[in-house]
Image (cartoon, helix red, strand yellow):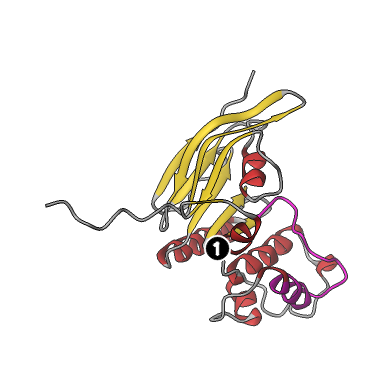
Amino acid sequence: MPSSESAPLPLLAARRLSFARNESRVFGPLDFSVDAGEALLVQGDNGAGKTTLLRVLAGLLRADDGEIDIRGTRAQPLARAVTVAYLGHLPALKADLSTLENLEFLCGLHGRRPSQTLEVAMGVVGLSGFEDSPARQLSAGQKKRLSLARLWLSPAPLWLLDEPYANLDLAGIELVNRMVQAHLREGGAALVTTHGAYAAPPVRTRLLELGKQS
């Protein structure tokens, strides 16, 4: 007899999703989903719409057409706020606050995993000893690591990572891979954009390839 248990709903699913700028299509229509425990690798050349797609999924831009569901329910701002953590190109830091003050501020906005402390997160990303340093004094790579600490503290199960390896050395690239692996082991999921310059994280991965629109 068939099992009475239905398959688990994906964390996020998109149907016929498209976005246009100045009447020129950037991407779409797209159909895809991402399940707990997996990474969806979004590849494409510069200008293919990778960043725009993640901003649409995060609710920062409005799609021109299509639907986005979170755990089987049409995405609403509150559901996005508790489900999605977005790591963009900009570090989203306040320059005159210390690293710890930045994390405190961001956790106040986005929440924090109860099992984690700010100091532990700083250690995870290799910034122990920089707790009192103003963010403006950090290098580009250190700012990226501080943004990764904020991501590590987030309780959101779905990570949207836009070129997460940018501004990182080889040790930083390995850090991102370890973080993604740990997040997926705990039942999380990730969408990771790349233009192909870096290898995908060594996890269960599917590919979504975007092409430039004419």
The residue most toward the top is 214
Rendered position, 62 above or below 132: above
Q: Nearer the viewer, residue 61 or 132?
A: 61
User: In the picture, residue 196 is in which quadrant?
Assistant: top right
Q: Which residue is mark 1?
A: 175
The residue most toward the right is 96
Estimate the x, y position of residue 75 in percent, counting from the top left: 58, 51
Estimate the x, y position of residue 155 in percent, counting from the top left: 57, 70
Rendered position, 81 above or below 102: above
> Is 25 left, or right, of 185 in this rendering?
right
Q: Mark 1: give few (<14), some (14-19) or many (20+) Cα within 10 Å.
A: some
Q: Nearer the viewer, residue 91 or 12?
A: 12
Name the residue: 64% across, 34% down. Answer: 49
> Is 191 left, or right, of 2 in this rendering?
right
Name the residue: 54% across, 37% down. Answer: 43
Quarter of the C terminus within the rendering: top right
**Kind of residue indicated by mark 1:** Leu
* Magenta stretch contains residue 91: yes
* Magenta stretch contains residue 15: no
Estimate the x, y position of residue 103 in percent, counting from the top left: 72, 73
Q: Nearer the viewer, residue 178 or 3?
A: 3
Magenta stretch: give its range: 87-108
Estimate the x, y position of residue 66 in percent, counting from the top left: 57, 36
> Is 163 left, or right, of 21 in this rendering?
left
Q: Secondary structure at mark 1?
A: helix
Tally the marks: 1
Q: Nearer the viewer, residue 20 or 197?
A: 20
